[in-house]
Image: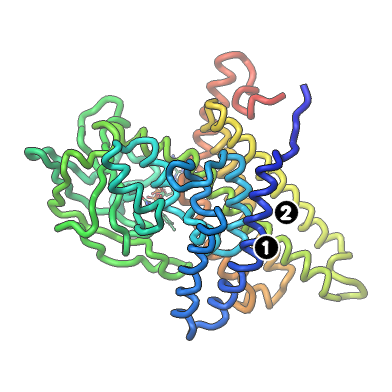
Amino acid sequence: MAIDFTLPPEVEDVRLRVRTFMDEEVRPVQEGLQREEAERGRFIQEIVKLRERAKDQGLWNPHMPKEWDGMGLSITAMAFVSAEAARVGGIGPYVLNAQAPDEGNMHTLLAWATDEQKEKYLRPLTEGRGRSCFAMTEPEVAGSDPTQIQTTAVKDGDDWVLNGHKWFISGARGAQFAICIARTDPDADPPQARNSAFLVDIPSEGWEVVRDIDTMHGRGNHCEITIKDVRVSAKNMLGGQGEGHKLGQARLGPARLAHCMRWIGQAEVALEMLVDRALKRFSHGSLLADKQAIQWMMADSAMELYTGKLMILHAAYRIENGLEFRQEVSFAKHHVANALWKIIDRSIQVHGALGYSTDTPLADMMKAARSARLVDGADEVHQQTIARNVIKAYKADGTTRMATGDLL
Ligand SMILES: Cc1cc2nc3c(=O)[nH]c(=O)nc-3n(C[C@H](O)[C@H](O)[C@H](O)COP(=O)(O)OP(=O)(O)OC[C@H]3O[C@@H](n4cnc5c(N)ncnc54)[C@H](O)[C@@H]3O)c2cc1C
C-alpha cells in the first residue's frame, strides 16, 4: 500500500489563496498596527474591512460547513489554512473568523446545539456579528481536573440558577454569550457526569467581569468573572444534563489541533527569522549560517516542525475518518507547544541582543508561546494520558504499537 502525501488540488488551491491574501492584504495592516500605535483606530477599521474582503474572496469561516457560511473544508485542509493564517500574528485567524475561542465554540454549537440554539447563538458567530467565550476554569480548583468544578447550577422552576467563580475566560469582555460549565449533579458516578453546559446571555444579571487579568503577555481579555444567582432558562442547557465533561472533551480534540496548526505558523516564522539573521550576521571569519552550532539549531528546529506537521496531519486524518484520536491529539498538542517555545528561543539566541529587544516580534511571540504549554491541557496532563494509553495497549496485547500511532 502506497501512502500518498500529495495534497489534493483543492487543498493546495485554498492554501495558496490564503497565503496570498495574508501576504498581500493582511500583513501590511498587522505591521502598521505594530509600528504606529497612535494610528491604532485607523488600523482597527482596516481589520474590519479585511474581514469583508475575506468574505468576498470566499475565505470566510474555513472551519464551518457550507450551509453555515463556511468553506466546508476537511480538518486536514483546515490545518493548512490555519498555519497560513497564523503566520500573520494574532489577526490572521480573526480576519478569517477562525480565532479562538469562537472557532471552538462554533464547532461545539454545531455538534451539540438544538436548531433554535443554533439560530440564536451560532448564526451571529458565523456571520461575524457576535463573539463568545468558554467559561470552565476556576481559581479555587485545578483546571486540569474539571470533575472538581465548583460553580453550581440548581434547577428552579423552568430556570437554572448559577453561582460560582471563573477565571482566564478568553474573550469574555465584549462577548454576547458564554458556554459556561457548571455542576448540576454533585453525586454523579462517574464524576465526569457531574457537569452540564449552559448558554449564558451576556449581559445577564449577576454575571460580572471583575477584571481583565494581567498576564506576562499583557492584557489579552482573559477575564475573571463572578456568577451570582444568574438565571438561565432550561432551554439554554447545551447538550444533555451531565454531559458538560463530554462536551468539553469533544470540543477539545479539534480545538487543540486548531491551536497546534496556528502554533506551526508562528514557529515557521521564528525559524525563517533565525535563518535570515544567520545568513546576514558575520562573526569570527564566517556567517553565522556557516557555523555548525547554528546549523544544529536549524536542524533541530526543522525536525521539530516536520514531526509536528506529521503529527497534526495524522491526528486530523484520524478525526476525519471517525477513528479514536485522543492519543494522537495529545502527541501533537504536547509536541508542537514545546517545539514552538524551543524554536522561538533559538531564534532569539541567534539574534543576540536584538532578539532580547522588542525591535523584532520575537519577544512578543515568546511571551504568547508560553501559554501553549498550559492551555487546553498542561504538558503533564497530556503525558499522563499518553502514558495511560501506552500501559493499556501493552496490557491488551503485549505491545505498545496501538498507543504509538498504530502505524508500523
Ligand atoms: C492565556 C490563557 C487563556 C485561557 N483561556 C481559557 C478559557 O477561555 N476558558 C477556560 O475555561 N480556561 C482558560 N484558560 C485556563 C486553562 O484552561 C487552565 O490554565 C488549564 O486548564 C490548567 O488549569 P490551572 O491553570 O488551574 O492549572 P492546574 O490544574 O492547577 O495545574 C497546574 C500545574 O500542575 C501540573 N499538573 C496538573 N495536573 C497534573 C497531573 N495530573 N499530573 C502531573 N502534573 C499535573 C501541571 O504542570 C500544571 O501546569 C486559559 C489559560 C491561559 C493561560
Question: Is 38 situated left or right of 141 in this image?
Answer: right
What is the CA distance from the residue labelled 1 to the residue labelled 2? Answer: 10 Å
Quarter of the figure with the C terminus: top right
Relative image position of residue 9 (x, y in whole percent): 71, 42
- Between disc 1 and disc 2, whose residue precedes? 1
Q: Is mark 1 within 8 Å of ligand 1?
A: no
Q: Would you say residue 370 is visible in this rendering?
A: no
Circle 2 residues within 10 Å: few <14, some 14–19, many ≥20: many
Asked whether mark 2 lies closer than 8 Å to ligand 1, one says no
Farthest-out residue, left: 157
The image's mark for residue 57 is: none
Hey, what amino acid is under mark 1?
A: Ala
Marks 1 and 2: CB-CB under 8 Å? yes
Query: Horizontal and vertical percent for residue 276?
Result: 78, 68
228 displayed left or right of 138: left
Name the residue beneath numbered marker 1: 270
Using the image, determine if residue 220 lies above or below residue 133.
Answer: below
Q: Residue at x 24, y 44 (%)?
A: 150
Q: Residue at x 78, y 25 (%)?
A: 2
Q: Give the amino acid at mark 2.
A: Ser
Check disc 2 and report the residue beneath it: 301
Extreme top residue here?
397
Residue 305 seen anywhere in this rendered image of the structure: yes
- The answer to whether 154 is drawn above or below residue 175 in the figure is above
Indicate the quadrant where residue 88 lies: bottom right
Q: Residue 127 in the image: x percent, y percent? A: 40, 54
Q: Nearer the viewer, residue 123 or 36?
A: 123
Task: Indicate the quadrant where residue 17 lies.
Answer: bottom right
Secondary structure type for disc 1: helix
Q: Position of residue 117 (x, y in %)?
A: 28, 42
Select label 1 or label 2 by which is in front. Answer: 1
